[in-house]
Amino acid sequence: MHANAKDFKQNAHRALNDAFLQGAIRKATQRFVNERTHAVAERPDFEALRERGRAIKQEALDRLPDLLQEFEDNVISSGGQVHWARDAEEAQQIIVRIARNAGVKTIVKSKSMTTEEIGLNPVLEREGFVPVETDLGEYILQLDDDYPSHIIAPAVHKTKEDVANIFERRLHVKNPPEAGIPGLNAIARKALRGNFLKAEMGLTGANLACAETGTIVLVENEGNICLTTALPRIHVALVGIEKVVPRFDDLSTMLMLLPRSATGQRLGSYTSFITGIAKNGEEGPEQFHVVLLDNGRSRIYADEHLRGSLRCIRCGACLNACPVYNRTGGHAYGWVYPGPIGAVITPQYLGLAEAPELPYASSLCGACYEVCPVKIEIPHMLLELRGQVAQGTAQRAPVKRPFLEALSFRAFAFAAQRPALWRLLSGIGRRVLRSKASGATIPSVPLPVLQDWTRDRDLPTPPADGFLEQWRTRRGNKGDDA
Ligand code: SF4
């Protein structure tokens, strides 16, 4: 997909004016939030579980090179093949080569944000293959030439009427609106089933990769992943290097956290553990390829402040909890990964200069951290990225802030370091603002720097006494112990 993460503000304004989008996003995320709350309440030990999940993923990061080597050895010893891809282009080439060598035409795909990340479908089409998305949401988006707006519910921005129109237009189904949701599901199922049967290759991501056994784990609700990995004679899994966990025993902890956080389920409807190829007359693929993808992850790994973002298991809980995502939806973030985790990782993948607004797409309320099953400190990371933006220490080109904003912060820093000047200016500012206020708030302050803020929010009227005056008064009242 074409990245337009630079335009977050503009994208967000467009989304805020889209009444349908507002309703659809809020309805979907509220449902996920409610389901998650219910599922978490069933486990009084959920906090301990979160801590275990954090520790497993942190250990995996601490031992990442060794674990990846162990994973590779175990995939190979169970009959699979491992390919290392430095970046998106290399991963695309590896997958095309595997498909070409095996005389593949049709490729069935399960939902995979990693294949979205490397922009795989257009490349496969250009090379003459027929990639077919088999997750219902992804299938709808593929038919409509659209892209996901949520990590686990990719077509959350579409109504059932939209879907009916897409099916009518692309699948030539007569009067699909009358079919209702079950009918629409049936139309998609019928259209997809034939592809499973004729596809020579199944392409998936992986939710987890176990170093100890060389197993990949895939969680789903629709059954399409089972078919994608079992029916075609070749299975290719594109796996980000951060998906590895050390031990088979760790999988149970991660599988207690992932579906609860994602959809509020105790378990996904189907969980596939895939180790190697079919042997001794078993059913299943003759070839199993794992493509281990870096594509910027090593760069993130090298940053001690941001490395923790690689613990992400892509459950989407932080999106559902985020007041910003709840209003803007996913497309506003301008790349594959939306929401709070997208605001952290997109600037790292694309470079801060390509996504300078994203670290600011947050109220820093901390809701994302509260729900994250692996306790990623997203607000701290956003602050770190804001610091990098302000200081121009972005990994690529330094980011230019608007002149007025840069000047305001320089003036603030100058005054804040000089107590007498600060007292003088804050006293004048309080008086000016109080003289303009008629009630408890100042609805619209005609000052250039504050206008953006007060356009959408009320600015509380400042108190007559500032902090220092109040401090002195209280200290005086309470004596030296205050
Ligand atoms: S950051 Fe945490 S809550 Fe957000 S998608 Fe990743 S694991 Fe889930």
Image: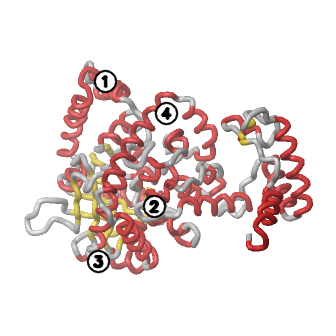
Q: Residue at the spot x=57%, y=29% of the render? A: 17
Q: Which of the two marks, 3 or 1, is nearer to us in this view?
A: 3
Q: CA distance from mark 3 to mark 4?
A: 45 Å
**In this view of the protein, which residue sits in the foreground, 79 or 5?**
5
Which is closer to the viewer, label 1 or label 2?
1
Quadrant position of ligand 1 = bottom left
- Cα distance between the residues tagged 1 and 2: 37 Å
Tell me the residue at 25%/48% (across/down): 221
Residue 447 position by quadrant: top right
User: Which of the labelled discs sits on residue 111, or is there none?
Assistant: none
Question: What whole-number distance in Å separates the C-alpha atoms at marks 2 and 3?
Answer: 27 Å
Q: Position of residue 35 (x, y in %)?
A: 33, 47
Give percent across and percent down for residue 429. 86, 46
Give the amino acid at mark 1: Glu
- Cα–Cα gap, marks 3 and 1: 48 Å
Q: Which residue is mark 4?
A: 22
- Does residue 330 appear to the left or right of 141 in the view shown? right
Instruction: Mark yes or no: residue 84 visible.
Output: no
